[in-house]
């Protein structure tokens, strides 16, 4: 890994740093009019349009044009381009980790520690925004708690997605690509322009039909097969210079047929270059008669209105978010030695986790004019949601038992908050930014469980219910000092909160273990943002320490076939994030992002047993042994010490054409990917993955053809692993969720 990383470091950089070069919202690609400057990057991380280099927050902004160029279609695909960010590919909802902290997948109803916002609408669940990754203006990743301006459940960070708005002039494009590795295609179409003098419209759609990268020996197909359909209609009404109203309605149908799990050994390291090439998943799994798939259907609507009231701006945001999921998880039946069972005897167990969710929200805020001693934003927010999770467990010949058991989890939730942020400009160089948010959250939940047919496998309790009412006060303070007009330093202290909740998807839930407490985070950060040589170079640096109290944890115990959900007392992550961008010539851009992270539990009494521990050290069947068990000092999952990417972006004129080449090397040091922290199968070795792109386009950008490669060295890495319970497998083994393998696409675009 070291030698390949050194070679890649010498020649490659990330092309992702730039977000948008003006505040006009049209998302023009700056490469069409290259100047000897990296341009001005505008973001809205603090609810105002600001230059990225003026925002005292550790933030990475990625242009929508970059997402399209690299064929990035979801959060998992972008994670390697953002320092200290990881997205778990667990086969359930995608889970985002920032600086080592994220809400694991084992409790499906968890609110997320890293919330996603789509055009200002809060999304606390991974399935809410499965469709937005096309026709985006930009994506902003804010590291550290964002409680003051963004609110609850941003204890570790926030991700803001901004879709493109309608344009004042007519424009559009069609784009189609074919992936040679996946034997499939995707196509995108966009039309935008004025309808009347005051009304403009943007219509965008995308479809994807691709095969997967793991051969299913049962039917000869390549899993997982991607079937996506997305559409977005946006209307913008501007009756006067003081009124700007944007309405958006978006539909997404995200379907993955098949899965990404493969079997592995408990005893030896088998994760070489060929690991994960094959799996064996039969139909009618455990007698369920269901296909292995993961489907999410979403509707998202939003109204954003900016109204000028004198020198102030009133912003109103209202949104509706709905999703339904259809999930059935099957398990690879191949033994670690590659043996396929002749009679499908290992096909003993399957799980389904369909969900149904509705959320309504409204927000109002007022922003003062700029250029005063005190600049402020004040606002109020309210949301309410209904959530239902149904679980089906199908089993055949497990302890000689065959049957079907189910659980149902219902939750009603509401939250309101009032917030404000003030900027005190003591001088042109020195400012103090203070923020405060008060939040109130109420939840009611019911849980029931029953045996549908056959013999019961899991103990069935009487069911339970619970409620909670919580309030949080999240303050923040930042001192910012401009050493020069192009160099700024800042120091921040901020608090964040994540609401408590309930256990949603296990059996025999005891009433006293149904509810878990909220968690709190505190972040201390020192930062530097600087630009040199009239825009020829930029260096951004953040040094941080983030502490969590009552960190919510959910882990799987395969021996008892149950989940532990509880609060760990304390955890801490410390580290450094460095982002560098250089423009050595008019046509060449170099980028490098490097992050160091040290993330560990400081105190975790009652933690599940570790794989390497003996029964004398920890006995999962003994309540007293578990209560006395503490794994303080253990690293957090999915938290490599080193991560980052390096690359280049170059363009040159070739007669009447423009040739653009770019490449990127992403790297991670080793990290744990499994509950129990097995030193053999629970560790993902460090890796380096290389992306590259070559594009030939006309000078007026009317059409272009690009060859895009991702993970060109075809590294096989795992997103997560677990040990199979001995009762549902003939051969002792692990189950591994694989990240995406190599992808090579040819993409053509025609603009009009």
Image (tube, rainbow, N blue to C red):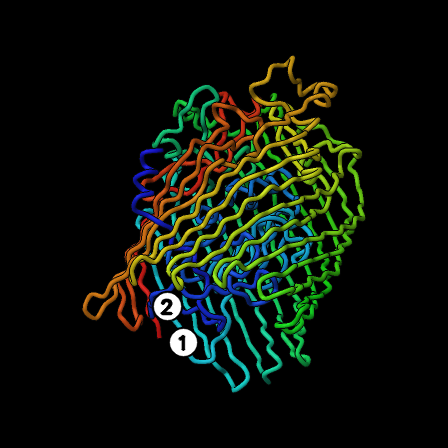
**What secondary structure is found at the residue carrying circle 2?**
strand
Judge by depth and name the residue closer to the eye, 509 or 512: 512
Of residues 294 and 541, the one nearer the viewer is 541
Q: Which residue is mark 2?
A: 174
Mark 1 highlights which residue?
Answer: 171
Image check: 101 left or right of 625?
Answer: left
Write down the quadrant of residue 358 in the picture. bottom right
Secondary structure state at the residue bearing disc 1? strand
247 vs 391: above or below: below
Tag 2 and tag 1, C-beta contact below 8 Å:
no
Q: Position of residue 645 (x, y in %)?
A: 40, 46
Residue 508, picture quadrant: top right
Residue at image location 45% in from the left, 54% down from the top: 73
Say which mark, if any, is on residue 612: none
Relative to the observer, which residue lies in front, 578 or 208?
A: 578
- Point out residue 325 in the picture as x, y percentages from the top left corner: 58, 50
Residue most extreme to the top: 616
Taking the image as shown, residue 358 lies to the left or right of residue 588, namely: right
**Badge nearest the viewer, 2 or 1:** 1
């Amino acid at each position: 890994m070291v030698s390949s990383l050194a070679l890649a470091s010498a020649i490659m950089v990330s092309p992702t740093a730039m977000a948008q070069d003006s505040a006009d919202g049209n998302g023009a690609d700056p490469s069409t009019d290259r100047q000897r400057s990296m341009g001005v990057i505008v973001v809205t991380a603090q609810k105002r349009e600001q230059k990225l280099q003026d925002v005292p927050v550790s933030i990475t902004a990625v242009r929508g044009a970059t997402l399209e160029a690299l064929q990035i279609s979801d959060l998992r695909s972008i994670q390697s381009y953002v320092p200290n960010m990881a997205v778990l590919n667990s086969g359930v909802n995608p889970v985002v980790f920032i600086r080592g902290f994220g809400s694991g997948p084992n409790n499906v109803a968890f609110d997320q520690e890293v919330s996603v916002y789509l055009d200002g609408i809060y999304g606390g669940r991974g399935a809410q925004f499965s469709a937005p990754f096309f026709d985006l203006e930009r994506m902003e990743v804010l590291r550290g708690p964002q409680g003051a301006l963004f609110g609850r459940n941003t204890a570790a960070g926030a991700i803001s997605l901004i879709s493109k708005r309608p344009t004042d002039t007519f424009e559009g494009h069609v784009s189609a690509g074919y992936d040679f590795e996946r034997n499939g295609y995707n196509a995108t179409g966009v039309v935008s322009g004025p309808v009347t003098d005051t009304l403009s419209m943007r219509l965008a759609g995308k479809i994807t039909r691709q095969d997967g990268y793991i051969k299913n020996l049962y039917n000869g197909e390549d899993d997982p097969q991607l079937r996506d359909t997305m559409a977005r209609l946006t209307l913008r009404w501007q009756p006067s210079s003081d009124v700007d109203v944007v309405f958006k309605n978006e539909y997404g149908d995200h379907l993955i047929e098949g899965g990404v799990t493969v079997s592995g050994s408990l005893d030896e390291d088998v994760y070489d270059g060929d690991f994960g090439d094959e799996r064996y998943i039969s139909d009618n799994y455990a007698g369920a008669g269901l296909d292995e798939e993961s489907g999410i259907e979403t509707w998202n609507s939003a109204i954003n209105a900016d109204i000028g009231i004198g020198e102030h701006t009133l912003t109103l945001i209202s949104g509706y978010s709905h999703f339904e999921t259809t999930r059935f998880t099957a398990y690879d039946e191949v033994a670690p030695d590659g043996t396929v069972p002749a009679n499908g005897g290992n096909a003993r167990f399957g799980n389904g986790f369909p969900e149904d969710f509705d959320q309504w929200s409204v927000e109002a805020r007022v922003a003062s004019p700029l250029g005063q001693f005190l600049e402020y934003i004040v606002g109020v927010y309210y949301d309410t949601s209904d959530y239902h999770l149904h679980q089906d467990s199908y089993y055949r010949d497990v302890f000689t038992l065959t049957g079907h058991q189910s659980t149902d989890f219902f939750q009603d939730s509401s939250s309101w908050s009032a917030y404000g942020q003030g900027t005190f400009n003591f001088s042109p160089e020195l400012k103090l930014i203070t923020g405060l948010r008060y939040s109130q959250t109420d939840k009611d939940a019911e849980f029931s469980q029953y045996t549908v047919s056959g013999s019961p496998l899991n103990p069935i309790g009487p069911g339970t219910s619970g409620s909670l009412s919580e309030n949080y006060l999240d303050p923040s303070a930042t001192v910012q000092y401009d050493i020069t007009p192009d160099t700024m330093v800042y120091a921040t202290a901020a608090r964040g909160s994540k609401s408590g909740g309930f256990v949603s998807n296990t059996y025999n839930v005891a009433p006293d273990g149904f509810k878990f407490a909220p968690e709190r985070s505190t972040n201390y950060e020192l930062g530097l943002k600087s630009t040199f040589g009239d825009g020829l170079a930029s260096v951004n640096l953040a040094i941080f320490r983030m502490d969590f109290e009552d960190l919510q944890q959910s882990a799987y115990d395969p021996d008892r076939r149950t989940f532990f959900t509880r609060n760990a007392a304390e955890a801490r992550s410390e580290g450094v994030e460095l982002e560098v961008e250089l423009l050595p010539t008019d046509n060449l851009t170099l980028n490098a992002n490097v992050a160091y992270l040290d993330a560990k539990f400081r105190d975790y009494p009652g933690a599940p047993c570790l794989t390497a521990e003996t029964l004398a050290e920890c006995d999962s069947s003994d309540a007293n042994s578990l209560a006395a068990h503490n794994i303080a000092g253990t690293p957090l999952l999915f938290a490599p010490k080193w991560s980052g990417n390096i690359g280049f972006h170059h363009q040159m004129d070739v007669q009447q054409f423009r040739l653009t080449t770019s490449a990127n090397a992403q790297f991670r040091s080793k990290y744990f990917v499994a509950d129990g922290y097995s030193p053999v199968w629970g560790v993902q070795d460090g890796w380096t993955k290389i992306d590259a792109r070559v594009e030939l386009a006309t000078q007026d950008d009317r059409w272009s053809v690009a060859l895009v490669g991702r993970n060109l060295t075809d590294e096989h890495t795992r997103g997560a692993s677990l040990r199979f319970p001995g009762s549902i497998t003939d051969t002792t083994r692990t189950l591994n969720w694989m990240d995406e393998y190599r992808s090579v696409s040819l993409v053509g675009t025609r603009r009009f």
